Image (cartoon, rainbow, N blue to C red):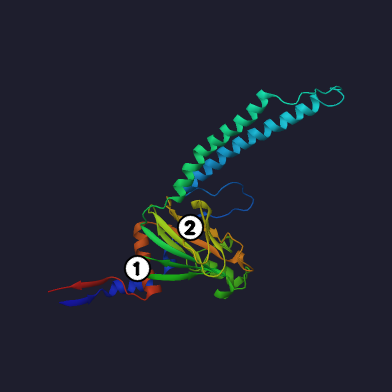
């Protein structure tokens, strides 16, 4: 039996840096100056949450208009000038029943839609890819649990990457070199989380020092990273692209400088990235072949 190494496979694996998955991807999940509302929903979870938010906003708006109108009517109809002799009754059974029953009905109606959405978010399915995210002051560490490698993810321009947390010419050039633009400053990281489109991703979240929070708005996920505890969230991204998030729990002086970058790619691109990532971060040559005579 002879053990043969595929030289071309090894070379391609070593050359395929994790940033490879950047090529050709659209930036979808990014905040926009002056814009209002949510980022485009990229998961079923986000779509449900956004619909629920819109539905509750309609209910709240109707209640606000009703109460405002009722107050205005009472002010006009029952002021001292128009009503010099106020009534002396102490209660009204019909009104009291109404203002008790109607809020109950409204809350039950909201709960009928919000509880299924909550259960959908909190019931963790079986994972196709499991990633452990650990929050540090002030960066994220990621471990691909089933693949045997891990890496740290720093904001491009952070002191740890040679920057000073400001958009200097050097930082802007670093963004360009990594395939980003100046608009991605404070959002882009040197190493991104890469996941395949259409697959169930389970992220185990914890903290190494203080409480952080792992958040991707376009996915509809947010989970506190608490030291000593391991929490989970899940998502299935429906569209390839680049999605940004931020640590969403105040974690001291550099809290604003620990963003999250997730790249959603095709299964083929993910397999190629995975091969390069193992070589890059675990030092494991890929495409090892065994042949026998």
- CB under 8 Å between discs 2 and 1: no
- Please give left or right for residue 91 compared with residue 264 in the image: right
Image mark for residue 188: none
Q: Quadrant of the C terminus?
A: bottom left
Residue beneath disc 1: 275
In the image as oriented, which residue stretches furthest toward the left? 293
The residue nearer to you, when weighing 246 against 188, is 246
In the image as oriented, which residue stretches furthest toward the front? 90
- Give the residue drawn at x 79%, y 29%: 75
Q: Quadrant of the N terminus?
A: bottom left
The image shows residue 2, relative to residue 259, as above or below, that is below
Total numbered labels placed on residues in the image: 2
Circle 1 residues within 10 Å: few <14, some 14–19, many ≥20: many
Residue 287 percent coordinates (x, y)? 28, 70
Q: Please identify the quarter of the rendering in which residue 277 is found.
A: bottom left
The residue nearer to you, when weighing 7 against 286, is 286
- Please give left or right for residue 292 compared with residue 116 in the image: left
Circle nearer the N terminus (2, 1): 2
Circle 2 residues within 10 Å: few <14, some 14–19, many ≥20: many
Instruction: Determine whether the residue tagged by mark 1 lies in a helix, strand or loop.
Output: helix
The image shows residue 112, relative to residue 230, as above or below, that is above
Image mark for residue 242: 2
C-alpha distance separating marks 2 and 1: 20 Å
Residue 44 seen by the camera: no
Residue 38 percent coordinates (x, y)? 56, 48
Residue 81 percent coordinates (x, y)? 87, 24
The image shows residue 291, relative to residue 47, as above or below, that is below
Q: Please identify the quarter of the rendering in which residue 170 is found.
A: bottom right
Residue 191 percent coordinates (x, y)? 47, 68
The residue nearer to you, when weighing 166 against 170, is 166
Residue 145 seen by the camera: yes
- Please give left or right for residue 225 compared with residue 144 in the image: right
């Amino acid at each position: 039996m002879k053990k043969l190494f595929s030289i071309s496979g090894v070379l391609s694996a070593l050359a395929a840096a994790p940033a490879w998955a950047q090529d050709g991807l659209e930036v979808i999940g990014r905040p926009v100056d002056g814009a209002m509302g949510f980022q485009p929903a990229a998961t079923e979870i986000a779509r449900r949450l956004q619909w629920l938010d819109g539905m509750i906003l309609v209910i709240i708006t109707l209640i606000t208009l009703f109460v405002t109108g009722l107050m205005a009517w009472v002010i006009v109809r029952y002021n001292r000038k128009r009503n010099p002799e106020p009534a002396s009754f102490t209660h009204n059974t019909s009104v009291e029943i109404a203002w008790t029953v109607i809020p109950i009905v409204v809350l039950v109606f909201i709960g009928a839609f919000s509880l299924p959405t909550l259960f959908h978010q909190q019931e963790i399915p079986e994972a196709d890819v499991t990633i452990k995210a650990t929050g540090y002051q002030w960066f994220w560490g990621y471990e691909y649990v089933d693949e045997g490698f891990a890496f740290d993810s720093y904001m491009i321009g952070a002191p740890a990457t040679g920057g000073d947390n400001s958009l200097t010419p050097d930082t802007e050039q670093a963004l360009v070199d990594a395939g980003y633009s100046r608009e991605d400053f404070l959002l882009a990281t040197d190493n991104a989380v890469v996941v395949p489109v259409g697959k169930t991703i389970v992220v185990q979240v914890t903290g190494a020092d203080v409480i952080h929070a792992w958040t991707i708005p376009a996915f509809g996920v947010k989970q506190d990273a608490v030291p000593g505890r391991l929490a989970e969230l899940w998502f299935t991204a429906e569209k390839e692209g680049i999605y940004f998030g931020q640590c969403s729990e105040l974690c001291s002086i550099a809290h604003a400088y620990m963003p999250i970058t997730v790249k959603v790619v095709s299964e083929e691109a993910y397999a190629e990235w995975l091969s390069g990532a193992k070589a890059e971060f675990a030092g494991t040559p890929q495409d090892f072949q065994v042949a026998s005579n």
